[in-house]
Image (cartoon, helix red, strand yellow):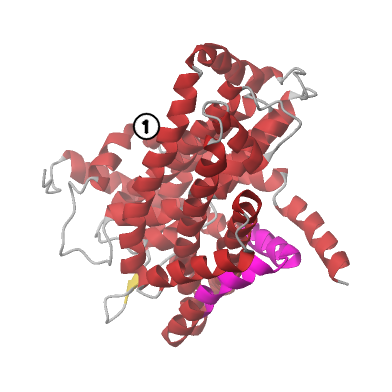
């Protein structure tokens, strides 16, 4: 019974995360880029100034700063996909997949801008100062009560995805990698992850934001630094690699070594899919984190959120891609996923990848786990009220032990399906409320250019 169910769910995952969904995600990003006249380029410098705290006001409603909101959302997206997923995309799609991955990341910046602007516009702050926001709220409040069933569906899908993809899958992968690399028992990894998850999660969004605001910059510096060592070590290969990234994006990849060659259609699919999976633009997860930001200006937080896909996909994923490509291991038939990335790091300093990649996986998985706990908690709160949030946190903190020990096939496949289906209610709301977003954007930039916003430094 279970193998049959799992086989059915695997087929369903392929359909849900197939070309139609990828086309919707990219098409939405392209539409928004055109309608807002390339705001991800025009507003980039202003977005950086906001993150630096230039416009922070301690009296604004919310629970965390712009920087903390960005780090919390990034900690959920900068995960295993940045290490293993990129390797799979290049192994299957060749160097040209990198080009389409970057292009999709740039389009995703506008989707994040739109959905996270709505999360501030339609959030609710209760009598205790706690923020309630995200797609379930802007679906109900922005579109009206008759849309509540769609909001409830989103909340259910989000809560379930948090348990599966956001929690147990992360721990399962870490436990497997540490067991294979160092012989550490799965149960030990599960307990370790559970304890350290509890230290952050049980303190609520403020403690999660405090942890991620340290962890995300630390992870980025360490990982990008390690990647640059490999890239600079093989700097002579860069001109040829950049040539093939652009050329193969439009012509396909010829056979090389164990690589059998691939048509341009599959190159595009691999790059686009990896970017969509990695930066979560359009899924509706990041708006939950950004809704907690302290601000009175919805568009301001949308601009902050816009930086997420840039950092996650254009920077971190591209670093992984370049490491794999310049090292020359991408055409190898001996490895794929995390193993391929480790081989690439080993090519520079023998033995380096064996330690560097598992540590990177641990940090990325932990950060994803704690941020998704908040997403699941807010979804749970929407469905069942505030009384269930504390029990949810304790339940969530126990799951890493389960994830480390159990085979998760059907559960993970169902989570993957629901994760993809989150796109439907979220982007429906975004597209229906586009006139409101455009109006708010026009008003915000008129105020900005008129000097009505106080800049602290």
**Image location (x, y in percent) of residue 53:** 20, 49
**Image location (x, y in percent) of residue 312:** 46, 42
Lateral position of residue 287 relative to residue 46, left or right: right
Q: Quadrant of the C terminus?
A: top left
Residue range of the region highlighted in magenta in the rendering: 395-422
Give the residue drawn at x 36%, y 65%: 208
Crowding at label 1, few (<14), some or many (≥20) Cα neighbours within 10 Å?
few
Q: Is residue 416 magenta?
A: yes
Q: Quadrant of the N terminus?
A: bottom right
- Closer to us: 338 or 63: 338
Lateral position of residue 39 relative to residue 282, left or right: left
The main secondary structure of the magenta stretch is helix
Give the residue drawn at x 27%, y 47%: 51
**Image location (x, y in percent) of residue 384:** 50, 84
In the picture as drawn, the residue positioned furthest to the bottom comes out as 387
Give the residue drawn at x 23%, y 41%: 49
- Closer to us: 398 or 118: 398
> Is residue 333 positioned above or below 60 on the image?
above
Q: Is residue 28 magenta?
A: no
Q: Is residue 246 visible?
A: yes
* Residue identifier under label 1: 41
Give the residue drawn at x 74%, y 63%: 409
**Rendering quarter of residue 223:** top left
> Is residue 231 positioned above or below 366 on the image?
above
Lateral position of residue 221 relative to residue 355, left or right: left
């Amino acid at each position: 019974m279970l193998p049959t169910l799992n086989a059915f769910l695997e087929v369903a995952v392929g359909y849900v995360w197939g070309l139609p969904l990828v086309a919707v995600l990219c098409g939405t990003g392209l539409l928004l880029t055109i309608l807002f006249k390339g705001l991800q380029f025009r507003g980039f410098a202003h977005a950086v100034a906001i993150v630096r705290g230039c416009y922070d006001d301690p009296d604004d409603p919310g629970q965390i700063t712009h920087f903390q909101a960005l780090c919390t959302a990034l900690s959920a997206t900068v995960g295993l996909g940045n290490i293993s997923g990129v390797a799979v995309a290049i192994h299957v799609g060749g160097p040209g997949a990198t080009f389409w991955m970057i292009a999709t990341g740039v389009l995703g910046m506008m989707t994040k801008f739109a959905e996270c602007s709505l999360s501030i516009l339609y959030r609710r702050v209760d009598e205790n100062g706690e923020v309630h926001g995200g797609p379930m709220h802007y679906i109900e409040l922005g579109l009206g009560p008759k849309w509540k069933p769609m909001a409830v569906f989103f909340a259910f899908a989000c809560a379930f995805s948090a348990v599966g993809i956001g929690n147990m899958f992360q721990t399962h992968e870490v436990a497997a990698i540490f067991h294979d690399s160092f012989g550490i028992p799965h149960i030990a990894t599960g307990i370790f992850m559970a304890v350290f998850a509890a230290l952050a999660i049980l303190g609520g969004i403020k403690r999660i934001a405090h942890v991620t605001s340290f962890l995300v910059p630390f992870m980025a510096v360490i990982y990008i630094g390690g990647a640059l060592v490999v890239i600079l070590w093989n700097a002579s290969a860069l001109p040829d690699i950049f040539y093939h990234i652009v050329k193969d994006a439009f012509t396909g990849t010829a056979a090389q070594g164990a690589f059998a060659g691939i048509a341009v259609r599959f190159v595009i699919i691999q790059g686009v899919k990896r970017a969509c999976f990695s930066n979560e633009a359009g899924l509706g997860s990041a708006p939950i984190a950004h809704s907690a930001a302290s601000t009175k200006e919805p568009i301001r937080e949308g601009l902050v959120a816009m930086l997420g896909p840039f950092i996650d996909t254009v920077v971190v994923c591209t670093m992984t891609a370049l490491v794999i490509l310049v090292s020359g291991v991408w055409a190898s038939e001996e490895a794929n996923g995390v193993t391929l990335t480790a081989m690439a790091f080993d090519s520079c300093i023998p033995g380096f990848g064996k330690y560097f990649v598992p540590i990177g996986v641990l940090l990325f998985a932990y950060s994803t786990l704690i941020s998704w706990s908040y997403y699941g908690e807010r979804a749970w709160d929407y469905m069942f009220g505030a009384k269930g949030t504390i029990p949810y946190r304790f339940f969530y903190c126990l799951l890493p032990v389960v994830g480390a020990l159990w085979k998760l096939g059907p559960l993970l496949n169902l989570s993957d399906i629901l994760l993809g289906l989150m796109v439907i209610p979220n982007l429906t709301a975004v597209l229906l409320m586009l006139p409101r977003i455009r109006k708010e954007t026009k008003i915000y930039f008129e105020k900005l250019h008129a000097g009505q916003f106080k800049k602290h430094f």
